[in-house]
Image (cartoon, rainbow, N blue to C red):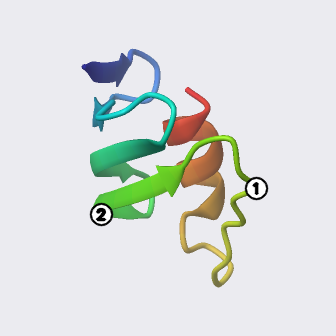
Amino acid sequence: MYIVGSSHNVSVAVQYSDVSEKLVIKGAREHNLKNIDITMPRNSLVVITGLSGSGKSSLAFDTIYA
């Protein structure tokens, strides 16, 4: 599945290997995100930390929540 945001020109590959276990994002590119891959557990609290301007909000809101 590819998510394409028309207003932000986002292209992210999302793989659902096991829907109940984890969310896999490959090649996220939005603002400061430079082609990152991430695997996150589902049904768990996940905390995103980093320096100011490192892409935390882009990852959380423009990639995962979108």
Question: For residue 31, which quarter of the picture?
Answer: bottom left
Residue hosting label 2: 34
- In the picture, measured across the screen, residue 14 lies left or right of residue 55, that is left
On the image, the x and y values in percent for residue 23 come to 44, 41
Which residue is depicted at the point 48% across and 41% down? Answer: 21
Which residue is depicted at the point 55% across and 74% down? Answer: 54
- In the picture, measured across the screen, residue 41 lies left or right of residue 36, that is right
Q: Nearer the viewer, residue 32 or 46?
A: 46
Q: How many marks can you see?
A: 2
- In the picture, measured across the screen, residue 19 lies left or right of residue 34, that is right
Q: Nearer the viewer, residue 48 or 56?
A: 48
Q: Relative to residue 39, is residue 19 depicted above or below?
A: above
Q: Nearer the viewer, residue 44 or 5?
A: 44
Which residue is depicted at the point 44% across and 63% down? Answer: 32
Q: Nearer the viewer, mark 2 or mark 1?
A: 1
Check whether the beta carbons of the residues at disc 2 and disc 1 lie within 8 A of each other: no
Mark 2 vs mark 1: which is more N-terminal? 2
Which residue is depicted at the point 38% across and 59% down? Answer: 38
On the image, the x and y values in percent for residue 9 come to 34, 28
On the image, the x and y values in percent for residue 30 come to 41, 48
* Three-letter amino acid code at the position of disc 1: Leu
Residue lying at the far top of the rendered structure = 6
Residue hosting label 1: 45
Q: CA distance from mark 2 to mark 1?
A: 24 Å
Quarter holding the N terminus is top left
Question: For residue 45, which quarter of the picture?
Answer: bottom right
